[in-house]
């Protein structure tokens, strides 16, 4: 009976020891798991992300997304700070950089524009010493335009009489050229080189000397015959160099590098046309005295009067041609109005 009484308490003691050992093991495991979870807690800040918002107006803005704090930590924690357990917090990562030069928040990115060749053209008009001009331009890239200019003008004056000489004239301008425009550093200032491919600029004059009127030719005095008055016509051509090179400068783009349609460029330069050529033809009869006793037909160089007249005529023409040799450049100054639009 005493053996059975002792056996029951021993069994109960063994069961209690087993339960106590299991509780201690569970407590140790929980502590290890808590320490491991505490050491693997995430950083306070997440990496900042740069977002680039493309707007329809071809401009962009860089915006940084503010870092979001992890739950359970203060957003005021920075590098060198510790959390509530005494563990040092890791440093926040550097913000991500967007493409190109970093921009401050709220400051727009500089516009990046790339011209598509032959995507835009301009048509305009101007007034210059070449006449009334019509021009067309095409965009090549950010720095270059190509142009074709055409100019024309015509004016005929009614005959006027000056000192017994009746003169009527005609001014006829017609020209066409090709030009290449350069905009240094993609600015509004322009340098231009080109060729005047067609140049029909000229002036003509027709004259008639009133019968009995005197005139001077190379310092010699002649009289127009009453029976056969002297007549003549002259041609002054301004285009002895073909094709004629040209150079100019100015400001204002013929084709704006934006969505604008209207532009108002200016141009100043010169055309190397060479010395003007002068041709004079005469007809009729002239006399060396007022009484018209010594007269001769201008075309008859066998007579003394006719021979002297033609000699003096050529000498006078040579003087005029020498003066014209000093004028080989023709001026360009124009103010244009151009309308531009996209074609592709």
Image (cartoon, helix red, strand yellow):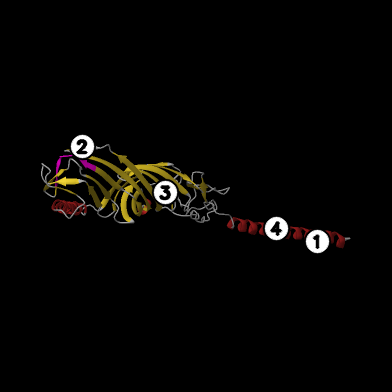
Between disc 4 and disc 2, the foreground one is: 2
Q: Residue at x 61, y 57 (%)?
A: 35
Of the image marks 2 and 3, the number of the one nearer the N terminus: 3
Crowd class of label 3 (few under 14; some 14 to 19; many from 20; radius 10 Å): many
x and y percentages locating residue 5 in the rendered image: 85, 59
Of the image marks 1 and 4, the number of the one nearer the N terminus: 1
Disc marking residue 10: 1
User: What are the residue bounds of the magenta stretch?
Assistant: 207-216
Cβ–Cβ under 8 Å for marks 1 and 4: no
x and y percentages locating residue 310 in the rendered image: 18, 53
Quadrant the N terminus occupies: bottom right
x and y percentages locating residue 102 in the rendered image: 44, 52
| Residue on which the image places disc 2 | 161
| Residue on which the image places disc 4 | 26
Between disc 1 and disc 2, the foreground one is: 2
Between disc 3 and disc 4, the foreground one is: 3
């Amino acid at each position: 009976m005493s053996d059975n009484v002792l056996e029951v308490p021993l069994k109960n003691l063994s069961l209690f020891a087993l339960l106590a050992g299991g509780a201690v093991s569970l407590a140790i495991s929980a502590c290890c798991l808590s320490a491991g979870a505490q050491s693997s807690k995430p950083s306070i800040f997440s990496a900042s992300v740069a977002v680039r918002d493309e707007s329809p107006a071809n401009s962009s803005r860089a915006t940084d997304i503010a870092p979001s704090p992890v739950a359970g930590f203060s957003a005021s924690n920075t590098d060198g700070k510790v959390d509530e357990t005494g563990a040092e917090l890791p440093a926040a990562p550097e913000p991500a950089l967007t493409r190109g030069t970093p921009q401050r928040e709220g400051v727009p990115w500089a516009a990046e524009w790339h011209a598509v060749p032959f995507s835009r053209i301009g048509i305009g008009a101007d007034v210059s010493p070449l006449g009334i001009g019509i021009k067309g331009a095409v965009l090549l890239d950010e720095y270059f335009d190509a142009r074709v200019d055409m100019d024309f003008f015509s004016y005929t004056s009614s005959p006027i009489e000056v000192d017994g000489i009746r003169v009527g004239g005609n001014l006829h301008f017609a020209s066409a050229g090709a030009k290449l425009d350069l905009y240094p550093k993609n600015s509004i200032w322009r340098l231009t080189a080109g060729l005047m491919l067609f140049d029909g600029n000229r002036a003509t004059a027709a004259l008639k000397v009133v019968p009995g009127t005197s005139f001077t030719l190379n310092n010699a005095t002649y009289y127009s015959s009453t029976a056969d008055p002297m007549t003549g016509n002259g041609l002054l051509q301004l285009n002895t160099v073909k094709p004629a090179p040209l150079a100019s400068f100015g400001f204002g783009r013929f084709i704006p590098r934006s969505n604008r349609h209207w532009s108002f460029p200016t141009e100043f330069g010169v055309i190397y046309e060479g010395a003007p050529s002068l041709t004079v033809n005469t007809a009729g009869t002239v006399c060396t005295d007022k009484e018209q006793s010594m007269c001769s037909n201008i075309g008859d160089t066998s007579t003394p009067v006719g021979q002297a007249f033609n000699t003096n005529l050529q000498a006078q023409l040579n003087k005029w041609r020498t003066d014209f040799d000093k004028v080989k450049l023709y001026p360009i100054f124009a103010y244009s109005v151009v309308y531009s639009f996209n074609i592709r």
